[in-house]
Structures are given as C-alpha cells and as structure tokens.
Amino acid sequence: MIRVVVVSATCLFYFMDRYWYHRLLVGSVNHAIAIEKKYRHDIPELSLSDAIGKESPYKPRGRLIRFVAWLVVRERRYKETGDLHSDAKIELFYKPIILLLLAATAIIALMGGVTLEKSAAWRWWDFTLPV
C-alpha cells in the first residue's frame, strides 16, 4: 500500500514538474532569447540563454545509463540525436524511480505481500517530547 502511494506521489511530482514548472522555465528562456536577440549588437555580453543552451544537452555515458535512457526516454530530440535535453532529463530522473517502485510492488505482491505477526512495538502517541 505504501509503495502505491509513493508511486502515485512520484507520478504527481513528475507531471507537475514536466507540464507546469518546466513549461514556465521554457517560456522564460524563450522570452530571454528574444530579448538577447533584440539587444545582441548593443550588449554582446547579454547571452545567458545561448550559454545555457550550449551546455544543456548531455550525451549519456556508460552502458547502464544509456540503457536506462533508451528504456524510459521518449523525448523526440533524444531519439534523433542521442542528447538529453531538459525534457528528456526529467523523464530520465522520474521514470526509473516509478518503474523500480512498481516492480518492487509487483514482486512483493507475487510473493504474498507483507504481513505483521504481531502489533507494532510502538505507537506514535506513546512518545513524549523532552521538556
């Protein structure tokens, strides 16, 4: 039961991060790019978005990370170039956690679940704070 709650919470964080917060970041970067293009000749140092864009793509190294990325990342640019951009990085962070928790839940369920032989040795209301 606890794993199902954790998987649900992780999915909620993934959707919130990917479809709310990340969209705000993409919008702010796009607006910054427009400002930088407008003032590029007047203020050449104004190129933070370009610098971030050049450093953002990441090509996974190592067999395990490449396999996990191949398994879970569905982002178009990753499929085309093999580089992880921000959308793909979000997938690579959250989806393995969700899959591992689901697998652990299924394995535990197939093995008969978890049972308690006796009641818990402690109860939260028995604790007192030191004064």
Image: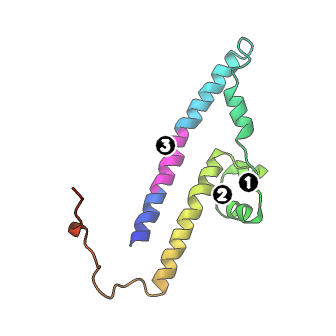
- Residue drawn at (44%, 64%), measured in percent from left and top? 6
- Image quarter in which the C terminus is found: bottom left
Mark before the other along the chain sequence, 2 or 3? 3
Which image quadrant is residue 112 in?
A: bottom left
Tag 3: amino acid: Trp
Mark before the other along the chain sequence, 2 or 1? 2
Above or below, 100 against 42 in this view is below
As drawn, the label of residue 20 is 3
Where is residue 74 shown, x and y percent of the image? 65, 56
The front one of 60 and 106 is 60
Pointer 1 local density, CA inside 10 Å: few below 14, some 14–19, many at least 20:
some
Where is residue 128 shown, x and y percent of the image? 22, 63
Q: Which residues are magenta?
A: 12-23
Where is residue 40 shown, x and y percent of the image? 72, 17
As drawn, the label of residue 79 is 1
As drawn, the label of residue 73 is 2
